[in-house]
Amino acid sequence: MAIVGSVAAIGAGLAVIGVGLGIGKIGGSAMEGIARQPEAAGKIQTAMIIAAALIEGAGLFGIVVALLGLGG
């Protein structure tokens, strides 16, 4: 049982790391885009927020699936 818990914790940690990297990449790319075209800042920001929300949702799904492995 301890091995299953350890694997679930590793899976949840990997999901969190992936989410952090994804949102960091989105934020950095959005800042570059705004710096290149300041007049498009509103559209870039909207797309960035939508993409970040989708990544957060996928990451949360990964964490839940990993933690559900604890019960099985």
Image: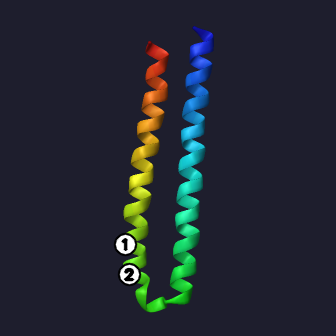
Q: Is residue 13 left or right of residue 52?
A: right
The N terminus, quarter of image: top right
Figure quadrant of residue 31: bottom right
Callout 1 secondary element: helix
Q: In which quarter of the image is residue 51?
A: bottom left
Taking the spot 51% from the left edge, 83% from the top edge, the residue there is 34
Left or right: 63 with respect to 2?
Answer: left
Marks 1 and 2: CB-CB under 8 Å?
yes
What's the residue at 58%, 63% (across, down)?
25
Task: Say if 53 sits above or below 70 in the image.
Answer: below
Q: Which amino acid does label 1 sit on?
A: Thr
Q: Mark 1 packing: few (<14 Cα in 10 Å), some, or many (20+)? A: few
* Residue for badge 1: 46
Cα separation, mark 1 vs mark 2, equals: 6 Å
Q: How many labels does the image show?
A: 2
Can you tell which mark lies on residue 42?
2
Picture coordinates of residue 40, whole percent (x, y): 42, 86
Numbered tag placed on residue 24 in the rendering: none
Task: Give, as a three-letter code, the residue at label 2.
Answer: Gly
- The colour scheme applied to this rendered structure is rainbow
Q: Residues within 10 Å of mark 2 (few under 14, many from 20)?
A: few
Name the element at disc 2: helix
Residue 18 appears at what percent x and percent y?
Answer: 57, 47
Q: Which residue is drawn at 44% across and 12% down?
A: 72
Task: Locate residue 19, reporting x and y percent.
Answer: 53, 49
Residue 43 to residue 51: above or below: below
